[in-house]
């Protein structure tokens, strides 16, 4: 009987721990087939550095609480394995750790980059003669993984952003005669406008916020934008705008102000486009504005998660374990939409070679002709993903989120000098 | 039998409509004593311009929904009446409208500036020989009204900010090894740090976010701040900061970037201090940061209101009507804390002369000695205010907020040319 490793990777979501809960629960249900389930601390780095947590020390009560706790309970990381040619030592180390702990199953919970890591681990393990079952558990607020109908983590952000912009719209509507006329909410979404699109669910009629959505898929045209704000304020008295952090100008450059920081994957750190848009509104139309940047609040807002999303997240984790036990390797369980009305879904799986390093953008027919809103087709796609509420329990006025014991295993190997 | 006018004023809150619900319900319960309840559209401007809504046309079902709907259902305004000497015409017009509609009761729902307006209306009505009962219904997210133990609207923002920074803390904790080390959340609070203080409720132990709170009451000292961030990151691996929009430097100047816009009350429009703080962290410590600006999201987040706050808001409205019927004038119903443990409270009332144009700041002993956090005394004060949840009903994945019919009364008078 072999053991397993579970790890979290990349930007966390409000429901990635629901996937952890699914993985751990499935492993406990299959205690006759899987020995110890280790969690690597801080993603793949925890494997490289042999920082392993024995999940058996966590009570079932606390594991259940993971379903409603945001963040990554075992720590996540932004760390991309290089190719085998570039850093053979890292891969040899992974296999060394796998061997030392008799690991037969590797569950990696992440987005695009992590799917690539998971695929590489599977391939290298084969190459180095220590085959394992590597399963990628999807998560990303960006909703940009291919093959899957949607990504766990996205539905909750969508619900949060749609609710928040709806609420801000009610606020602005009541203030607009003598005060703020334009409100701008900046949302996440580097290349894909799914989160920006979700704001559109709040405007169930043309008068309701948001009136304008700026997508990264649509080149930002200042004149067209200013004209749209102007006509909206003239018609409704105010204008609410959702803007994706990743919008670009005609030259393809990001509008975002803070472009100086680059992370380990070579991605530029975004943020700060809302004040820039506000500046344009002020300069060109001289309208009083307010702006908000949701940033991490949106992806950690477990207090307003979508019940559908929580169920998706739990089940991709739970099913991932069952797939591995059935002998599948280098695959990802994904969410398949069976029917739209009623919304029916199931978990299927696909090879990682079809998924790793690919990005899914908004289809053009999900965006209105003028580029400033979503279409009914988009609305139909998004609406099932925000259905249902699964509020966390509250204790003393605040959500009762769990911090695990994280019992560390005593290292067996010499430290890995060159990594991290 | 005389009629009544209700109006909303100043920045709205997520529970100001709960006060409206209380006022309307109390008037309907006293239909034998109060005739028609008019709502003025957009605050005092609706009275001046004779834009009155007959609330009798709203169903009881919709009035009940006001209890869980954010924004100001009848429209609010930022408009300050000048003194009688400066603009006698406005006051004469108010009385003219009161007379035309046989108004005996005036309920004005607002903050500091509105308490002043309500007091003036009462005084001028007396002076001009048309005495009315003017009652100020308190609301303000800033929690800065004197006399009252707390202000309706604040408890809900407090709960939202404490929850949000708790959630962001979980997110950051899991990412900090390889990614973001510092997260900054900008919150409202022009001169008083109550909202910033409420973030401190999330840190039930020293390791938990927020680690640093920047209050407008404490002069911002860059060196002390940088040293605190540095030591926090060294100790816990990351640092979460709540910063009030109104923090000031040693010269007493606002740090906030956007200081160019001034509203009708002469207040400067704030916002944008979070990116500035982030810049300091980057420049001095070279740590990866993220920042969020909650702005209107915090004061409209009815999806996460405090049940205690909703009850306060409803009851100050409901009690305000009863006080007026009992002959009280130029007063404000306020929340009185009877005992701390268990938290018991009641509604009392005080003359507006004791309240108008005064501001309540954080007492120094509510702020820790180093100026970067709250004390246990502050925690004891704040904690009862965020207790309980009263989630709005959700329909199709989003909160079921109400838009009223707002049946306008046909004007009886000639238009008021000089106002608005």
Image (cartoon, coloured by chain):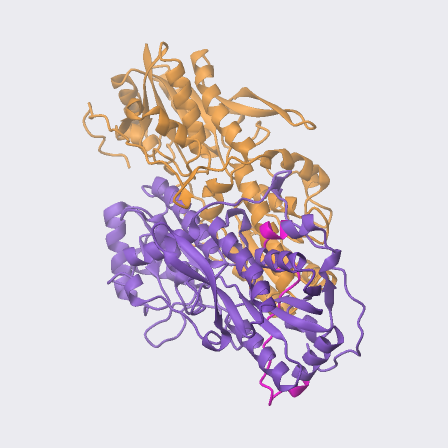
Chain colours: A orange, B purple
Q: Give the x, y percent position of residue B285.
A: 29, 56
Q: Is residue A419 visible?
A: yes
Residue B78 counted in the magenta span:
yes
Quadrant in which residue B327 is drawn:
bottom right
Q: In this view, does A218 lie above or below B132?
A: above
Q: Give the x, y percent position of residue B196.
A: 39, 59
* Front position in the image: A253 or A166: A166
Q: Which residue is drawn at 27% across and 49% down?
A: B206
Quadrant in which residue B1 is drawn:
bottom right
Q: Give the x, y percent position of residue B142.
A: 46, 64
Question: Viewed as shown, does residue A34 lie left or right of A203?
Answer: left
Q: Is residue A133 visible?
A: no
Quadrant in the picture for the C terminus of chain B: bottom right
* Front position in the image: A170 or B330: B330
Q: Is residue A316 above or below residue A163?
A: above
Residue A47 counted in the magenta span:
no
Tell me the magenta residue range.
B65-89
Q: Residue at x 33, y 34 (%)?
A: A42
* Front position in the image: A189 or B420: B420
Question: Viewed as shown, does residue B205 lie left or right of A115?
Answer: left
Quadrant in which residue B3 is drawn:
bottom right
Q: Which residue is drawn at 28% across and 31% down?
A: A406
Q: Give the x, y percent position of residue B143.
A: 44, 63
Q: Which residue is drawn at 52% across and 63% down?
A: B139
Q: In this view, does B99 lie above or below B169?
A: below
Give the overall secondary structure of the magenta segment. Answer: loop
* Front position in the image: B192 or A286: B192
Labels in figure, total? 0
């Amino acid at each position: 009987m072999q053991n397993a490793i579970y790890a979290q990777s990349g930007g966390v979501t409000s429901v990635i721990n629901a996937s952890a809960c699914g993985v751990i629960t499935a492993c406990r249900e299959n205690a006759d087939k899987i020995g110890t389930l280790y969690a690597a601390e801080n993603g793949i780095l925890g494997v490289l550095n042999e920082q392993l947590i024995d999940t058996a020390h966590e009570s079932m009560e606390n594991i259940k609480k993971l379903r409603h706790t945001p963040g990554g309970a075992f720590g996540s990381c932004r760390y991309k394995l290089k190719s085998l040619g570039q850093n053979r030592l890292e891969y040899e180390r992974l296999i060394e750790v796998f061997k030392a702990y008799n690991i037969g199953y590797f569950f990696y919970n992440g987005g695009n980059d992590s799917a690539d890591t998971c695929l590489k681990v599977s391939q290298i393990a084969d190459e180095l003669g220590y085959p394992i079952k590597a399963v990628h558990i999807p998560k990303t607020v960006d909703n940009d993984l291919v093959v899957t109908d949607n990504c766990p983590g996205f539905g909750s952000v969508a619900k949060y952003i749609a609710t928040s912009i709806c609420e801000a719209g009610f606020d602005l509507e009541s203030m607009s005669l003598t005060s703020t006329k334009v409100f701008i909410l900046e949302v996440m979404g580097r290349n894909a406008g799914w989160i920006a699109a979700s704001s559109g669910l709040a405007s169930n009629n043309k008068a309701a916020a948001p009136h304008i959505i700026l997508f990264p898929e649509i080149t930002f045209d200042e004149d067209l934008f200013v004209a749209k704000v102007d006509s909206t304020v003239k018609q409704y008295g105010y204008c609410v705008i959702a803007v994706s952090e990743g919008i670009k100008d005609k030259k393809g450059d990001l509008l975002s102000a803070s472009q100086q920081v680059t992370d380990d994957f070579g991605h530029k750190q975004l943020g700060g486009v809302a004040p820039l848009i506000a500046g344009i509104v002020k300069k060109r139309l001289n309208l009083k504005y307010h702006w908000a940047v949701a940033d991490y609040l949106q992806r950690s807002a477990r207090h307003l998660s979508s019940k559908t999303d929580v169920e998706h997240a739990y089940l991709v984790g739970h099913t991932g374990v069952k797939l591995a036990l059935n002998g599948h390797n280098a695959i990802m369980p994904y969410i398949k939409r069976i029917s739209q009305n009623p919304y029916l879904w199931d978990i299927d799986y696909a090879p990682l070679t079809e998924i790793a390093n690919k990005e899914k953008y908004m289809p053009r027919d999900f965006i209105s002709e003028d580029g400033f809103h979503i279409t009914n087709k988009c609305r139909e796609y998004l609406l099932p993903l925000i259905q249902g509420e699964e509020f966390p329990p509250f204790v003393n006025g605040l959500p009762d989120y769990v911090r695990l014991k994280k019992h560390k295993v005593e290292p067996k190997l010499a430290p890995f000098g060159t990594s991290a």
